[in-house]
Image: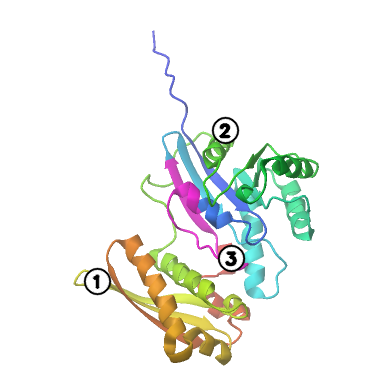
Amino acid sequence: MEEMSDKKPYKAGFVALIGRPNVGKSTLMNRLIGQKIAITSPKPQTTRTRARTILTLEEGQIVFLDTPGIHKAKDKLGNYMVSVAEHTLEEADVILWLVEPSNFIGGGERHIIEQLKKAKAPVILVINKTDTVKKEEVLAFIDTYQKELDFKEIVPVSALKGHNTERLVKCIFSYLPEGEPFFDEDMVTDQPMRQVLAELIREKALRSLEDEVPHGIAVSVERMREEKNICHIDATIACEKNSHKGIIIGKDGQMLKKIGSSARHEIEAMMEMKVALKLWVKVKKDWRDNDLLLKNFGYNPKDV
């Protein structure tokens, strides 16, 4: 007689994180993975590409698809970002919709609700930033959203503090299909290292610069080489105007030094080795509407 196995079946699947810009999607993904992959910044439209991040546990593997925030597109880059976000819904096994704790459902949320009504995958509503409100208020927010869509689960969390994130992972696994892992268990992202580094440098620029510059900047890593236990990285920050170039460089080059220094410290911690980082600033006029330049910076509509 065969012995009955009490081992639960292995599960694996794709989970889309969707929401308006700056609701904390990248912060949540970094929290769940336990290390920093997606860039975070208080400025909107921080995430531009679809970063795939992998969480492998004993019970299975979750591949998170962190999408750009859904917003009204103003240029070809904006069109690309919205297209990436909407395509992600189609291939996901589970959808996490992140919202801020509020009773107000605005136009941006209404647009997402319409997208989610068309989705075939189960939708879990995640009310983020619960550390900023009283516990009793959260119940009112849940009640507001419950009237809008038939959610499989509603999970309040604080991605920043890590509150209730373990429960969220259990919820996700309960809706994932059984199957083999898609990636090796030691992989945490499928992004090339150059892209991870370029995004990290862009985050430091976003955090340091004035509001009028960031949406118009992109970063590309031109060269990477290892020499005598030091990783030499050459990267270019591209902007759209000469006036922006001056702001990025700063008086006596101070702003560029600040961006470079904070990026270098984080890259060294990530790569566990000394890093020599050189940054250049170049003007690429209207690059957000130039198909070739968009492709050069890793935003290729054909990849969607």
Q: What amino acid type is highlighted by mark number 2?
A: Ser
In the image, which disc is placed on residue 174?
2
Q: Which residue bears the numbered disc 1?
A: 230
Residue closer to the observer: 258 or 291: 258
Among the two numbered marks 1 and 2 on one chain, the one whose residue lies closer to the N terminus: 2
Q: What amino acid type is highlighted by mark number 1?
A: Ile
Q: What amino acid type is highlighted by mark number 3?
A: Pro
Helix, strand or loop under label 3: loop
Residue stretch in magenta: 30-56
Residue closer to the observer: 101 or 53: 101
Q: Residue at x 78, y 57 (%)?
A: 106
Instruction: Tell me residue 50's x, y (percent).
Output: 55, 60
Q: Is residue 29 above or below residue 206?
A: above
Q: Residue at x 41, y 71 (%)?
A: 262
Report the mark closest to the observer, 3 or 1: 3
Quadrant location of the N terminus in the rendered image:
top left
Q: Is residue 155 magenta?
A: no
